Amino acid sequence: MKTRHIFVALLAVAAMMTSCKEKPVVGLITEPTPATSNVPGKEYPKINPDLSVVFQVNAPQAESVQLDLGHVYEMTKNAEGIWEVTSDPQVPGFHYYSIIVDGVRLADPSSQLFYGTGKMSSAIEIPEVGVDFYLPKDVPHGEIRMQRYWSELTQTWRTCYVYLPAEYEKNADKRYPVLYLYHGGGEDETGWAIQGKADNIMDNLIAAKQAVPMLIVMDRGEALIPGASMAGGPRGMFNFDPVDKLISQELIPMIDSKYRTVADRDHRAISGLSMGGFIAWSVGLNHPELFAYIGGFSGSGMAQNPDAYPASLNDQYKLLFISTGSDESPQMYATVTNFRDVLEKNGVKHIYYESPGTGHEWLNWRRSLKEFAPRLFK
């Protein structure tokens, strides 16, 4: 399915190359080009016009070098003695990868590092032709602040990131609604700020008057309470009670005290991707007094108990939003669509969005935020 989308994209590229010779097209690659996710000054990984990627590794003493880009490729030494391989054409978006040297999995020294897959990982950004909603533009830019706070529940200092719209410092008397936005499993509070490019997405939406100016709080979706297991309890990994307590008892009060927020449910939303989507549905439905908007991107409520989602939710929430990628794994796709079916059967109003051609990856979730944010606080 992904190969089909790649070929369709390449046909579009060919058409644009013939019709847009004078005006550069965003994301169009006409010759081998270093990835924007490379360490500055590094030539490789290099993206080809067909969106295949050339990787190189300088490991002269190694006996075996492989590339793991979702598919494992065997690398061979070129004429200069550098290990090299060209991947298949890649789907546009952000993809984690690693290098395996003599059986040891390593980050690529030529790539910037991103916290994902439970560790600092290499990644490559494959451009999408003609698409710039998550790229910086010549518009007023907000900022992302690092906010430290003490948690009595976890007995630790925690760090969250807070997006402030461009006008925040200029309108000292204005108060703003807040979106609490959560990352996925194996990622952390930096995910939306770095991999997700949430600030660019919001700057562009606000400048185009497609979304209202809002704060976005990006905190870690885990809370280990001393004496309790982070994944314990009857629901195992889906036990969100600790993070529920942290959000409702500590995070929201802290944000409302330090920032100019409109501190009521009608001006507060919660959303997230994958695991963060499950967090959003769990915490959001537990606290209708705190949130009027809930969104889950590749993450949903628990469809095993349909009675937990009655039509009365229509009177409690202003927006329930679900999204997934058309190329998600069958299990993940079914998890989201089965939940959608429960809501439809129960007469619960909601918005469903399906990102074409994307799997369980950041382009899917960037698109989801672009669809979700304009529907908030209006």
Image (tube, rainbow, N blue to C red):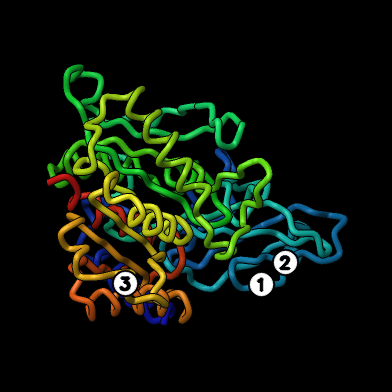
List the residue tagged with mark 1.
Answer: 72
The spot of residue 26 in percent (x, y) is 30, 52
Vertical comparison of 207 with 23: above or below:
above
Q: Are marks 2 and 1 in contact (CB under 8 Å)?
A: yes
Label number found at residue 66: 2
**Residue at figure coordinates x 30%, y 43% from the top left:** 179
Residue at disc 2, secondary structure: strand
> Is residue 282 rendered to the left or right of residue 57?
left
Question: Between tags 1 and 3, which lies in front?
Answer: 3
Estimate the x, y position of residue 332 in percent, counting from the top left.
Answer: 45, 74
Q: Are marks 2 and 3 in contact (CB under 8 Å)?
A: no
| Residue 212: image location, x then y, percent | 17, 40
The residue sitting at 38% across, 81% down in the picture is 4
- The answer to which image quadrant residue 7 occupies is bottom left
Say what amino acid the circle numbered 3 marks.
Answer: Pro
Instruction: Report the residue at 32% width, 66% height from top.
Output: 323
Query: Where is 316 relative to 192, above or below?
Result: below
